[in-house]
Amino acid sequence: MELRTHQKANNDFFEAYFYYEAKSPGLGEHFYTEVKAAYLIIQDHPLRQRILKGSYRVLNLKTFPFQIIYSYSKILNRISIFAIYHNSKNPKKKFRKF
């Protein structure tokens, strides 16, 4: 199954990674590990999370206050990661057009 990460999600990831790494050495690596583990969960069980809006699904990270916004296309056999969204941001903007 293909996992496609959009540029917005990559930007979100690196912004958070460098923030945490600057805050405490090694914390960025912990964030990285948790995001990668979440990606594996999504790949193994793409339909586990319920659809919240349109075709978007959300997986919460366990330790960090972030959500992974993604969709799954059974026809294309593809998962698309659209954003790694911080929980403190305006929830109305969570499902902005990507």
Image: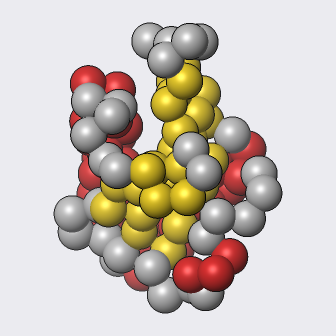
- Residue 65 showing in the rendered view: yes
Way the structure is coloured = secondary structure
Number of numbered tags placed on the structure image: 0
Residue at the image position 77 percent from the left and 51 percent from the top: 98
> Does 6 appear above or below 93?
above
Question: Camera-side residue: 26 or 55?
Answer: 55
Horizontal side of residue 6 vs 4, given as left or right: right
- Residue 61, by quadrant, is bottom left
Q: Quadrant of the N terminus?
A: top left
Residue located farthest toward the left when viewing the structure as drawn: 62
> Does 45 appear above or below 60?
above
Horizontal side of residue 70 vs 67, given as left or right: right
Residue at the image position 56 percent from the left and 44 percent from the top: 55
> Does 42 appear above or below 8?
above
Question: Camera-side residue: 10 or 3?
Answer: 3
Question: Camera-side residue: 86 or 73?
Answer: 73
Residue at the image position 78 percent from the left and 57 percent from the top: 97
- Residue 68 showing in the rendered view: no
What percent of the width, then of the height, locates residue 39? Answer: 37, 37
Residue at the image position 61 percent from the left and 70 percent from the top: 94
Horizontal side of residue 94 vs 58, given as left or right: right
Horizontal side of residue 80 vs 17, given as left or right: right
What percent of the width, then of the height, locates residue 27? Answer: 32, 66
What percent of the width, then of the height, locates residue 68? Answer: 45, 54
